[in-house]
Image: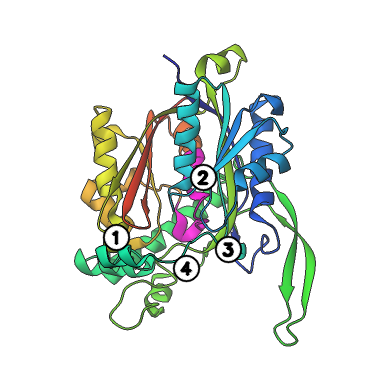
Amino acid sequence: MRQAVIVSYARTGLAKAARGGFNNTSNMAILGHAIEHAVKRAKVDPKEVEDVVAGCVAASGNVARAGALLAGLPITTSGVTINRACSSGLNAIAHAAHYVVHEGANIVVGSGVDSISFQGGGGGGKEPRLTDMYPDFWMPMIDTADVVAERYKVSRQYQDEYSLESQRRMAAAQQAGKFKDEIVPVKTKMKQVNKETKEETLVDCVVDRDECNRPDTTLEGLAKLEPVKGPGKYITAGNASQLSDGAAAVVVMEAKEAERRGLQPLGAFKGWAIAGCKPDEMGIGPVFAVPRLLERHGLKVDDIDLWELNEAFASQCLYSRDTLKIDPAKYNVNGGSIAIGHPFGMTGARLTGHALLEGRRRKAKRAVVSMCIGGGMGGAGLFEVYG
């Protein structure tokens, strides 16, 4: 029986959308950087990589193929880009693992990227028939987060308290250097705009850390923020994920091939599950995907040592955590997207790599990565952590 293991992981820092270090850098260039360094860390010859799978949401075209070429992989390495909204990066890794286990490939890159600064087309507009069938299908995700908060009584204070804890955990992890092994610095040209004259200039910049977090956040400050959708709503700039740019990549290899090369994998991909839910409460998708994943593997929630559940909004990740009865001490232990940022197609790949590294530090055996998905879905991936 073939087994897919993850032998390396690399990512960029996360930069603020429009205002950060990647605001003049294309998504394919960011992705290429992550792929290049993931392949280098795996100590494999680029020509041995058979395929590159990339998750990407806010762009059109085959970013994976372009990123592979920019990474220095040869024209014989193929590439495919997939879009399952916020689970795209995790779905890309599942796709890569499937190709290794079931199609005989030995080395495949799974990755994710998004540049919110350079959002492209590809949305395709709205289909009236789908609107008639499911009027909430096109509901903006921020509105679905408000629906979840109202429908399931997730209070504004509870959301703000959780968001503060995300900032605290992320700041502590950053201070302890827990992200340094993940991030590969990127030299860029950042666009700056003069507020008075509107003149644009390009300045040299190095993105070598996550720059979106706010370590000085206080509960009082969060409480003062006005809801984005107006009085009586819940979602603010402080309890939602931040718009950001970045890329992450892992090298997926067949286990015996890794052993033959003398490599020590970070862990193994064990499974992936997807589930649908009502579009107007898409944020609770993990409540349906996680049980399906665990049941297929004969596991219970308490059998999982480490959880990374994407913090799209505090309302949805709190409801999912509490409904699934996940121990908060095992959950998003170094903060999440509320503090770190959320380039849609990248996050699943980042969460996977981080869970494996943090799992190793904590001597964990199993980790689950999960997230809600626009349109009304949840995705979840199971990983075995190697010590």
Indicate which disc, 3 or 1, sits on the residue closer to the N terminus: 3
Answer yes or no: is residue 11 visible: no
Tell me residue 377's x, y (percent).
32, 51
Q: For the residue carrying disc 1, how many other residues have a C-alpha within 10 Å: few (<14), some (14-19), or many (20+)?
A: many
Residue pushed farthest top? 260
Indicate which disc, 2 or 1, sits on the residue closer to the N terminus: 1
Mark pair 3, 4: CA separation:
29 Å
Indicate which disc, 3 or 2, sits on the residue closer to the N terminus: 3
Tell me residue 286's x, y (percent).
30, 48
Residue 279 marker: 1
Q: Are marks 2 and 1 in contact (CB under 8 Å)?
A: no
| 48 over 273 or under it: above or below | above
Answer yes or no: is residue 225 visible: yes
Q: Are marks 3 and 4 in contact (CB under 8 Å)?
A: no
Q: Nearer the viewer, residue 238 or 59?
A: 59
Residue at the spot of label 4 = 217
Please state if 34 lies on the left or on the right of 147 as rendered: right
Residue at the spot of label 2 = 350
Q: Which residues are magenta?
A: 335-354
Element assignment for label 2:
helix
Q: Amino acid at mark 4?
A: Thr
In magenta stretch: residue 350: yes
Residue 119 marker: 3
Mark pair 2, 1: CA separation:
25 Å
The residue drawn where x is 29% and y is 36% is 293
Please state if 151 lies on the left or on the right of 181 as rendered: left
| 195 over 365 or under it: above or below | below
Of badges 3 and 2, the one in the foreground is: 3
Q: For the residue carrying disc 4, how many other residues have a C-alpha within 10 Å: few (<14), some (14-19), or many (20+)?
A: some
Q: How many marks?
A: 4
The residue drawn where x is 73% and y is 81% is 194
Q: Amino acid at mark 2?
A: Arg
